[in-house]
Image (tube, coloured by chain):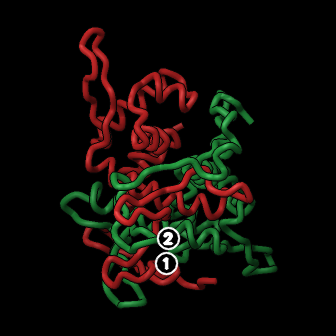
Chain colours: A red, B green
Amino acid sequence: MQRTDFGEMACSIARTLEVAGEPWSPLILRDVFVGIRRFDAIRNELGISKKVLAERLAWLVDHGLLERRAYSTRPPRDEYHLTEKGWELCDVLLAITAWGDRWTAGREGPPVLIRHHGCGEHTHADIRCAACGKPLHASEVTVEPGPGQGAAVHHHAEEAP
Amino acid sequence: MQRTDFGEMACSIARTLEVAGEPWSPLILRDVFVGIRRFDAIRNELGISKKVLAERLAWLVDHGLLERRAYSTRPPRDEYHLTEKGWELCDVLLAITAWGDRWTAGREGPPVLIRHHGCGEHTHADIRCAACGKPLHASEVTVEPGPGQGAAVHHHAEEAP
C-alpha cells in the first residue's frame, strides 16, 4: 500500500501529523518531557519493540524535535532531550491532555495533574485567541486561504451546537 | 502484528490518540469542521479509499465525535456533523495548526488563516494556564499523579485488546 505523504498536503494539521502523528511519537515525546530520556527506560515505559523505538527516535531527531546528548562514553550511550520545536509540541500535548481528561478519563478522574510553576496551581491548558485573549473555539472561527495555499478554497465553520 | 491498546493506558494523550490518533481521523474532523460533510466530498478532498473512509467515519461516530444526519431519503444519504466532543477536539486541532504553521509552513507561510468571530482578527491558538491565564509551557509545569493513575497502572502496552 502506498504511504500517503501528509507532509505534502497544504495543511498544518496534516504536516504536524506527518512529524508526530504516528501514535508512538507523541508518547515518546511525553516520556522525554517527564524525564524518561534513555532508550531502555522509554522502551520499558512504553512496552515498544527495540526496532520501532529506534526508528521513531531517529525520526524525531531527524525532524528536530529531539536531540541526542551523550551521558556515558564507555560504553557510548545517549539520552534524548527536547529541542525548542519539541518543547512547543509538548505545549500542544498539554492541550490534548486537557481534552483527554475531559472526554476520556471517566469517573476515576485524570491520570495526572498538571501544576503550573508560574502560579503554583493545578491547571489545564486553555486554548485562547492570540489576538483578543478570549477562549478560541473552532465553532467561532472562519478558515480563510493563507499565503501557503495554492488553490484557494473558502470554508466557513458553521452549526456549532 | 498486535494492535497496542492505547485506550487502556492511564494517559490522556494515549487515550486521545486511541480515539483520533490514526492520521486520517483528525483530517476527517478537519473536513467536517470546514463544512465538507458528505462521504464523496470527504473522499475527494482526502483522496482516501472508500473502505478506509467508511471505517474511520464509523469509528468517529461510535466514539461520539461525529453524528450522522440524513440529508436525503431517496436515496438515503447521510452527512456528518460534529458533536460537542468533536467540536472540542477541533479546538485542539487549532492548537496543532498553530504549531504546524510555526514549524512546518516554511517561507510560503501558513496554508490557511484563522479569523476569530469574537474579535474579527486573524489569530492563532494560544495555550494558556486555566488558573492564572498566563502562557502555559510544558517546560514550566510539573506532572503529578492524578486520581486516575491507579486505574491502568498494571496495564502495559504489550497487552493487546
**Which residue lies at the image location 34% right of the left edge and 67% below the top edge?**
B135
* Label 1: element kind: loop
Left or right of residue B61, residue A131 in this image: left
Quadrant of the rendering where the C terminus of chain A is positioned? bottom right
User: Above or below — where is A84 with respect to B126?
Assistant: above
Q: Nearer the viewer, residue B6 or B59?
A: B6
Q: Which mark is residue A137?
A: 1
User: Above or below — where is A143 with respect to A48?
Assistant: below
Q: Residue furthest left?
A: B107
Q: Residues within 10 Å of mark 2 (few under 14, many from 20)?
A: many
Left or right of residue A119, residue B17 in this image: right
**Amino acid on which the number 2 mark rests in the picture:** Asp
Residue A149 seen by the camera: yes
Q: Chain of mark 2?
A: B
Left or right of residue A90, residue A46 in this image: right
Q: Residues within 10 Å of mark 1 (few under 14, many from 20)?
A: many
Q: Residue furthest top?
A: A74
Q: Which mark is residue B91?
A: 2
Look at the numbered discs 1 and 2 and tell me whether their residues touch, using CB distance below 8 Å: yes
Q: Nearer the viewer, residue A95 or B93?
A: A95
**Which residue lies at the image location 65% right of the left edge and 52% below the top edge?**
B147
**Which residue lies at the image location 36% right of the left edge and 90% below the top edge?**
B119
Residue B21 seen by the camera: no
Quadrant of the rendering where the N terminus of chain A is positioned? top right
**Amino acid on which the number 1 mark rests in the picture:** His
Disc 1 versus disc 2: distance between alpha carbons?
Answer: 5 Å
Q: Can you give x and y, in whole percent of width and height, for residue B123 in the image?
A: 33, 78
Q: Can you give x and y, in whole percent of width and height, for residue A17 in the image?
A: 44, 51
Residue B50 position by quadrant: bottom right
